[in-house]
Structure formats: C-alpha cells, structure tokens
Image (cartoon, rainbow, N blue to C red):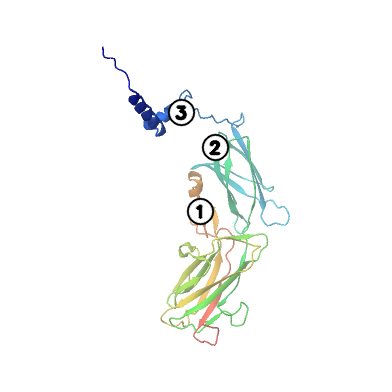
Amino acid sequence: MNKRGISTGMIILLVVLVVFAYSTNLLGIKDMVDNFGKGVPIEPTAVSKCPSSGLTEVTIQTGKALATTATDAIADYYVYDGDKFVTTGNSGSDGKSVFDVGCEVGKTYKAIVVNETLYTGYYPEFITIKASSPTDVHSFKMYTYGEVKIVGMSNGVTDFGVADNDWIGGAGAGKVCDWKIGYTINETTSAFNKPLIVCEANATAVTDITLNGVIKANAKAPSRLTPAAGSAFYVFEQDKLLTSEESQQTLYGKIQFGSTAPKAGDSTFKCRIADQAYYKMADYKTLSLENGWKLSAQNDETITNIGAQDTGQDTIYFTTNSTSGYC
C-alpha cells in the first residue's frame, strides 16, 4: 500500500506563502486576519444639543470701532441659509439684535451686518452663525463711513502747499514727468474702504499715468462720474480699509505726455477719491448672500453714490515753461 503524505518541503513552502500573503496583504488576507472577530466598525452618532423648541437664539452686539468710550453701532442684519434668504432685522439704538433660526446638528448660516445710510453708515461685517446649540453670540466693532481730504497734488519734487507746487513745468511732448498725491482721513473714529483715486486728463496731451503702491483699476470707475469732454479716466485702487488712526498717505507716480506738448484747454490733470461699500441688489431676497450684495463705488442699479462722500477734485497744471515747477 502506497501511503502518501505532505512532505516537509511542502509544509515549509506553504508557510512561506502564508507569511508572504499576510505581509503583503495579498487578496486582503492581512485585513481579514487583523479584523477577525472585531465586526464592522460603527461610526459614532452625533448627539444633538438643540433645545426642544428646535431653534437657536442668535445675539449680535455691535459697537463703533476706534471710539474712546463704548458706543453702540446701529446696524441691520441679513441672514442666508445657503442660497436662500432667511430673515432680516435692525439692532435698534442699543446695537443689539436678537432673533431665532432653525437648529440642527452641524447647521450654519451666513449673515451680513451693515448700515447702508449714505455718508454716516457702517462698513459691513460677515459672520457665520452656528445653529447647533441653544444660543450663538457674536460681538464686534464696526467702522463708520469717514471723510477723506486730498492734502495736495504736485510735481514730484516740491512739497504740498509750497508756491507753484501744483505745476508741472517743462511738460513737453513725449516727456515723462513725476507727480504725487497726498490724502488723509480728516474725521475721527472712522474709516474709508478701498479708496479709488479717480483721475482725468486730456486724452491727447497725456497717454498714460501711473501711481506706485496701488492697483490700476480703470474698470472700477463709477459711471455716476464722467470725465470732461476730450479727457479720459485713470483709476487706482488702494486695496485696504484706511482708518483715521493712520497717517497721511502719499503716493508717487509718472505722467507720460503725448507727441504734442500740452496747450490751452488740455493743461490740467484732476483727481478725486471715492470709497467702495456694499449695497444690496433690488432682488437680494431671491439671491444668495454672495450674489445679492455687491461691493462698488456706487449703486450700479440706481447709479447713485453709496458709502462715504467723495472728496472734491484737486488739480495739477501743465506748462511747457521749465521755470514753473520741474520736469
């Protein structure tokens, strides 16, 4: 009778194959061995902290930024749930707003808090409301619309306020001359958001204008302002919230003259400054927060000013006489 069995060599080969399959997780063998008897892992269930009313009470407390004593800021709130408008209201004179929103695990809402009153309102704050517990509280300070004054405009080498400082002499054909502008907030505890320096010059006499430290933003020129006949706008954006605590801003640039020297009728270069603020679109209730509110130097639907008041225009004069000013 021929008795057959497993040889020692075969046993060794099988052991080697099993070890290899486990170490390399061949066909998932390592996972099956490691998880044997453990069962399928169960994700923990989130526990709701919402009250029996199913509502989260939201409190928003707003104060005036930079004020030396506590000063309430009157503001409106507009709340959105994703792309859906939810509710709006006003804080009243105490700067405090209290309202309810639906509560559920992990629920959030977006809101804008703003006062759109022309010249005296407040730039907005954007908040995320966490509506997964009985209450949600937000406290912050807001910046009121401020006033900006142009301290002066001049050629690149004379100080503001010095005789003939507003002349660029030697402004001949094809020349490139230096210029500068200075401005500051002249109202305490206020701000001026993303200033737009809106300049205009004769389109033939001047072919380009630059200004250092700011962004060229011709497309942001508000259509409620129009350049003089034969002139073109050059717009520059200072991309920041300028506050009344900051010192005078002085920016330097270049003016490129055309192939013909400036003459009577095209010998001035004027600038004014406008801020940018948020305004709500007419159909903001049917849009998301991102689409229902717009940042601009005007209400583009009504073509009217918003935010702070524009500055008056200041002027630089051009002359080909090199003894008046410098170029």
Question: Could you tell me how far apart the alpha carbons at marks 2 and 3 are, in whole angstroms?
Answer: 38 Å
User: Mark 2 packing: few (<14 Cα in 10 Å), some, or many (20+)?
Assistant: some
Answer with mark 2 or mark 3, whichever residue precedes in sequence: 3
Residue 288: x and y, percent?
A: 49, 45
Instruction: Classify mark 2: helix, strand or loop.
Output: loop
Instruction: Classify mark 3: helix, strand or loop.
Output: helix
The structure residue drawn at horizontal position 33% and vertical position 22%, both measured from the top left corner, is 7
Q: Mark 2 points at which residue?
A: 107
Residue 8: x and y, percent?
A: 35, 24
Q: Name the residue under label 1.
A: 294
Question: Could you tell me how far apart the alpha carbons at marks 3 and 1 are, in whole angstroms?
Answer: 57 Å
User: Mark 1 packing: few (<14 Cα in 10 Å), some, or many (20+)?
Assistant: some
User: Mark 3 packing: few (<14 Cα in 10 Å), some, or many (20+)?
Assistant: few
Residue 262: x and y, percent?
A: 46, 81
Three-letter amino acid code at the position of disc 3: Asp
In the image, is residue 280 above or below residue 56?
below
Of all residues, the one furthest to the top in this rendering is 1
Which dot marks residue 34?
A: 3
The structure residue drawn at horizontal position 62% and vertical position 60%, both measured from the top left corner, is 191
Is there any visible trace of residue 215 in the rendered image?
yes
